[in-house]
Amino acid sequence: MRIAVVGAGGVGGGFGAALAKAGGDVTFIARGAHLAAMKSKGLRIEGGRGETHLVPTQATDDPKAVGPVDIVLFCVKLWDVESAGQHIKPLVGPNTAVIPLQNGIDAPERLIPILGKQAVMGGVAQISASIVEPGVIRQVGTFMRMLFGEFDGAKSKRGEELLALCLKAGFDAVLSEQILTELWMKFILLATNASMMSLTRQPIGKLRDDPDMRPHFVAAYREVIDVGRAQGVTLPPDTLDKMLAFNAGAPPAMKASMALDLERGNRIELPWLGGKVVELGRRAGVPTPTHALMYAALKPYVLGTPA
């Protein structure tokens, strides 16, 4: 199976390295110092699941040099969706599946006008990892899961083949018949956790164990659940309990990628996370006061630390 990973950060690098180790023909589309390091020294993944050193690493900044592949794992930041979508057109053949593994919920609808409805599947990545230096990715904890599926719920051949390779790679994977629900389940969790961790500059362990913080988590989760249901999304009756249970079992040091970006003074994905909750809530007439406050407080950092 030929796989292109677009964006070799914590998500793309972590999953891509595991699939390559399992025998997948994986090429990373990257740039800058990270690309140079992968080409010269390989890609190293370290952390809770042990170390993987992928040498040599197939990596390039030119999709034309790769040509059509079976699967594209699309892992760029949310502000790069449209430009990266145009850039990767040479990777997409008539049967290629492009699986956005970003945060948020709108990447698929933004990619479809560029790549076509047939090409785009839905995907959810669950991993806490980030680049710590060029060519090196560190994972927090051992949790690593990918969910993906066709938006019409079909069990496609391309989905089945990717599932088999994921399971061979040794991480949890699900070929979902209800990928829209899965996208929203992650969005409920991440839109809340990313804003909470960014606003407080604290990891999940410090926040979940603070009784004064729990009511704010509960309120924020409920707001996103209400917004999702107002959009017609089917969500389980115990969605709130699932969110709280995830927090309870998460590695104490875990931080959302948006919180890490904020700490580094980088641009943050707030408009597509907490900002999207506020936007959709306004459209649907659903109150989102907790998210509105967090969004307003974090908005000055959207383009990086204010000068």
Image: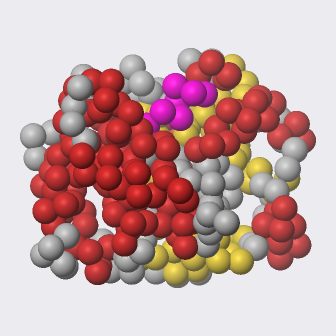
| Quadrant where the image shows the N terminus | top right
Q: Position of residue 248 (x, y in %)?
A: 21, 71
> Is residue 117 shown above or below 280?
above
**Relative to 64, is 116 on the left or the right?**
left
Q: Residue furthest left?
A: 237
Query: Which residue is rendered at x = 46% and y = 76% of the image?
Result: 140
| Quadrant where the image shows the C terminus | bottom right
> Is residue 89 shown above or below 173?
above
Q: Is residue 95 visible?
A: no
Query: Which residue is rendered at x = 69% and y = 47% of the image?
Result: 6
Q: Residue furthest front?
A: 307
Query: Which residue is rendered at x = 17% and y = 46% of the image?
Result: 222
Q: How many marks?
A: 0
Which residues fall within the magenta stretch? 103-111
Q: Position of residue 66 (x, y in %)?
A: 84, 41
Q: Nearer the viewer, residue 200 or 163?
A: 200
Q: Nearer the viewer, residue 159 or 42?
A: 42
> Is residue 24 shown above or below 209?
above
Q: Nearer the viewer, residue 299 or 137?
A: 299
**Relative to 202, is 99 on the left or the right?**
right
**Relative to 9, is 230 on the left or the right?**
left
Q: Is residue 30 visible?
A: yes
The picture quadrant where one finds residue 245 is: bottom left
Indicate yes or no whether the magenta region holds residue 230. no
Query: Which residue is rendered at x = 21% and y = 60% of the image?
Result: 217
The picture quadrant where one finds residue 68 is: top right
Q: Nearer the viewer, residue 189 or 267?
A: 267
Indicate yes or no whether the magenta region holds residue 109. yes
> Is residue 208 shown above or below 31?
below
Q: Position of residue 17 (x, y in %)?
A: 64, 63
The picture quadrant where one finds residue 100 is: top right
